[in-house]
Image (cartoon, rainbow, N blue to C red):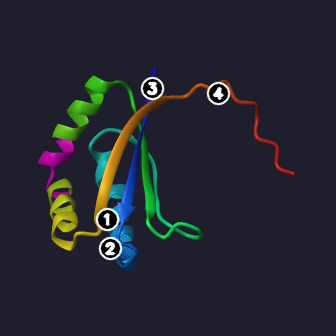
Amino acid sequence: MTITCFIRYEIDPFKRDAFAEYSRNWGQAIPRAGVDLIGYFAPHEGSATTAYGVYDVDSLAAYEAYRTRLAASPEGRANYEFAKRERFILKEDRMFLKRASTPHAEWVRP
């Protein structure tokens, strides 16, 4: 069973470009550390401070192993340091959910 990690960020609205860079960095580092990155999502319209990171992982044990690999990788360490130095993340919350809507019908485009 796959679980999905949703990370909700509260970001500094004046540092959205820094969050975008942080997201692009994770776009390279997270898959290399062994999980299925769905994506990072930054404010577009509406809230200027809420952003998300979403990825699938096989289990909580696999999540813990992934976090260890990510923290040990040079690109992971660099991105953590970038966030710490630039201080664009004001708050971060994680939750793990399982997909309840499957199986899905085939997507029909109008």
Q: CA distance from mark 2 to mark 3?
A: 31 Å
Q: Are marks 2 and 1 in contact (CB under 8 Å)?
A: yes
> Mark number for residue 101?
4
Per the rendered image, the range of residues in magenta is 69-75
- Identify the amino acid type marked 3: Thr
SS at circle 1: helix
Residue drawn at the location 64% of the way across and 25% of the way down: 102
Q: Residue furthest top?
A: 1
From the top left corner, tell me how far across and down residue 6 is, in percent: 42, 43
Q: Are marks 4 and 3 in contact (CB under 8 Å)?
A: no
Left or right of 61 on screen, residue 103: right
Residue drawn at the location 26% of the way across and 24% of the way down: 61
Residue drawn at the location 22% of the way across and 61% of the way down: 79
Give whichever of discs 1 and 3 has the lower sequence position.
3
Quarter where residue 96 is shown: top left
Asked if 5 appears above or below 23 in the picture, the reply is: above
Left or right of 67 on screen, residue 36: right
SS at circle 3: loop
- Identify the amino acid type marked 2: Ala
From the top left corner, tell me how far across and down residue 36 is, in percent: 41, 40
Residue drawn at the location 32% of the way across and 52% of the way down: 92
Asked if 88 appears above or below 62 in the picture, the reply is: below
> Mark number for residue 2?
3
Q: CA distance from mark 4 to mark 1?
A: 31 Å
Tell whether position 36 is magenta.
Answer: no
- Identify the amino acid type marked 1: Tyr
Between circles 4 and 3, the one closer to the viewer is 4
Q: CA distance from mark 4 to mark 2?
A: 34 Å
| Crowd tier of the residue under label 2, counting other residues whose Cα lies within 10 Å: few below 14, some 14–19, many 20 or above | some
Left or right of 74 on screen, residue 33: right
| Crowd tier of the residue under label 1, counting other residues whose Cα lies within 10 Å: few below 14, some 14–19, many 20 or above | some
> Mark number for residue 22?
1
